[in-house]
Amino acid sequence: MKWLDSLQRWEIDCPGTDGELAQTVFAQREPLFIAETFFGRFTRCFAVSLSPNDAEFNFVLKDSWQLVATDVEDAELRDEIGVLRGMHAALHKVKCDGAELQRLLCGGTVNIHGTPDSTRFVLGSELNAYTRQTLAISSDSSTSMHRLHRRMVSGPVGVALDKLGNERDISVALAGAMIAYTAILRHTSFLHRDISVGNIMAVKKRDGSVEGMLIDFDMAITQADVRALNTHVHVGTLPFMSIAGLECLKVTHTAADDWEAALALLFCLVTRPEKRNALDIKLESVDVHGEANLRREMFASR
């Protein structure tokens, strides 16, 4: 990744795996999104073009550090890149009216002179002293973990729901994203597990209409893998997690939890303006148990 002063753009190399060609893309100076903490995945997203002189940036490059089990080969990784690759294979002939499916152009592990870029590569023998005690999906406490530098390019570029400013378009985009969710679950068995305001995009069409696109499959896992987990792991983003997730109930995550998160998102974004500020204040002032009770009030109200 290097800055091209003459073009005022970043030139970023994105690796490919499973026969995909590596791709060099060109990004605007400022990222679309950057994580607020250096811990965790430290995700950065850039709007990119495939040519240095393109006026439009029609793709998104995502750069992150994924938590993986040590000594797992790239082809065996079950992270977002693998999920998107499997989605494309299963859904390329499936019609999803009102929905836009995220399409993977290329993706893989960043290499530094032939060596995979990872916390193990950076920290060496001091890795364990600096690695947080967290586990990757489907891992147990005896698994040795490290973070692997992963990068992918996908499209199209969408608009965040809270930037639309139009309740009808928000509702249409959310509905479209859940149409895509249903198709993904039916044909690949993947549960998204993080339905939230940042993970649904509105894709604007030439006729002015919008379609919904579900993104960010970092937490996605098959229904079979969820059932195989030894612990009842609840993931997601506050305040959109289901009541079971908020209260850490000892139940398995199902599609019902994701649909509940979608309904909570709908409540937060399309509540009448005179009610929305009061709702935002309530959500900011309560703990997770208070959010769960507030959710019960929402679902019980007219």
Image (cartoon, rainbow, N blue to C red):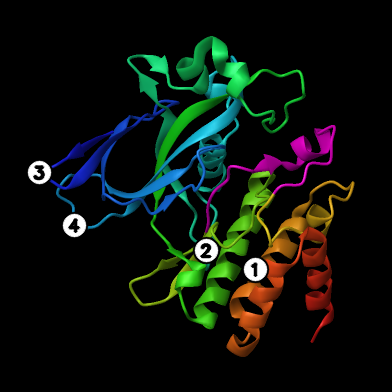
Q: Mark 2 packing: few (<14 Cα in 10 Å), some, or many (20+)? A: many
Residue that extends furthest to the right in the rendered view of this protein? 250
Taking the view exactly as shown, the residue that stands out farthest to the left is: 6
Asked if residue 253 lies left or right of residue 53, the reply is right
Disc 3 and disc 4: Cα gap in Å? 15 Å
Specify the segment rendered in magenta: 214-235
SS of the residue under disc 4: loop
Give the label, 2 or 3, closer to the camera: 3
Give the secondary structure at mark 2: loop
Q: Quadrant of the N terminus?
A: top left
- Mark 4: which amino acid? Ala
Q: Position of residue 191 (x, y in %)?
A: 69, 48
In terms of image quadrants, where is residue 256?
bottom right
- Between the C-alphas of marks 1 and 2, the distance is 18 Å
| For marks 2 and 3 on the same chain, the one whose residue lies earlier in the sequence | 3
**Residue underneath mark 1:** 265
- Mark before the other along the chain sequence, 3 or 4: 3
Q: Residue at x 52, y 17 (%)?
A: 120
Q: Nearer the viewer, residue 157 or 66?
A: 66
